[in-house]
Amino acid sequence: MNIIKSFNNTIDYLETVLDDEINEKKVTQLSGYSYSMFSRLFSILTETTLSEYLRSRRLTEAAIILRDTDEKIIDIAFKFGYESSDSFGAAFKNFHGLTPSEVRNGKPFKLFSRVQLAISVKGGRSMNITIQKKKAFTVAGVNEEKINSSLCTSIWKKLFSKVSHEEVSKLGTGESVGVCHDILKLDNHDVLENNTINYMAGYIVNDADQARSMGLDVLEVEETEYAIVELTGSVPKCIHNGWKYAMEVFFPEHCYVHSGKPDFEYYYEGDMDSKDYKMELWIPVVRSK
């Protein structure tokens, strides 16, 4: 199924349960992804977390009900998952800038519209993407689990506080990669609320035992087919642009989806702040059903 259509169908479903429990199996059925993977890809496409989106939509609907009905504030709070009128009031004021009572009495409130994903290519935007099957390989480095995705840079600093580029390069060919892995094993609440991922900063190595003796974590990667996205630009902007292009344009056009296996940021040497810096994304793919 076209990824944009399937995501919009999933969002349609989420809109029907803003005041109810989300059926994660339904999300998987509609989107073709686990709930945790859908949440991650949603944040890539929309540049907001799924939890922030749902919270904003719920508070918008709550304001509409406040204005249009006589339903008690405490009942509206319970309807949208808040445990008390105080917690609801605090979230409501933080979002709308006004209390529920003020909105009920006629003060203006904020409207956050539902998301509608669409393929949009501006200015002939295009990226070079190839499909490649890579044999099994090993990555050694520093692995951190259940971290906010914004902290990935700190993992690289931690790696280079343990070993130098020259030392770890001797274990292989000096190829450095950032790895997002085992997203399907993460708690869905962590992914939803905190944009949580498992991330490894490391190098492709040939000698895993030597890497372990140096105090490095080791990840064995099985043979997989990847969409290799060639990127040019400063980091992390070019990475974000690459993910959006793959999800919005390449996947729908060529009927691929993310397989759920580890994906990679493949770094070349150079100035990562330069607009001319080059690197790659390796996105594991399978054909969509």
Image: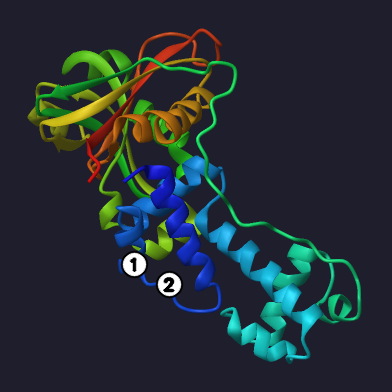
Q: Position of residue 106 (x, y in %)?
A: 91, 75
Residue 228 horizontal side relative to residue 55, left or right: left
Residue 217 visible, this angle: yes
Q: Secondary structure at mark 1?
A: helix
Q: Which residue is mark 1?
A: 26
Residue 156 horizontal side relative to residue 57, left or right: left
Which quadrant would residue 104 be assigned to in this image? bottom right
Above or below, 72 relative to 92: below
Pointer 1 local density, CA inside 10 Å: few below 14, some 14–19, many at least 20: some
Above or below, 280 relative to 208: above
Separation of residues labelled 2 and 1 (CA atoms) = 8 Å
Q: Which residue is mark 2?
A: 22
Residue type at tag 2: Ile
Q: How is the image coloured?
A: rainbow
Q: Residue at point 75% right, 65% down?
A: 94
Marks 2,1: beta carbons within 8 A: yes
Q: Residue at point 70% right, 67% down?
A: 60
Residue type at tag 1: Lys
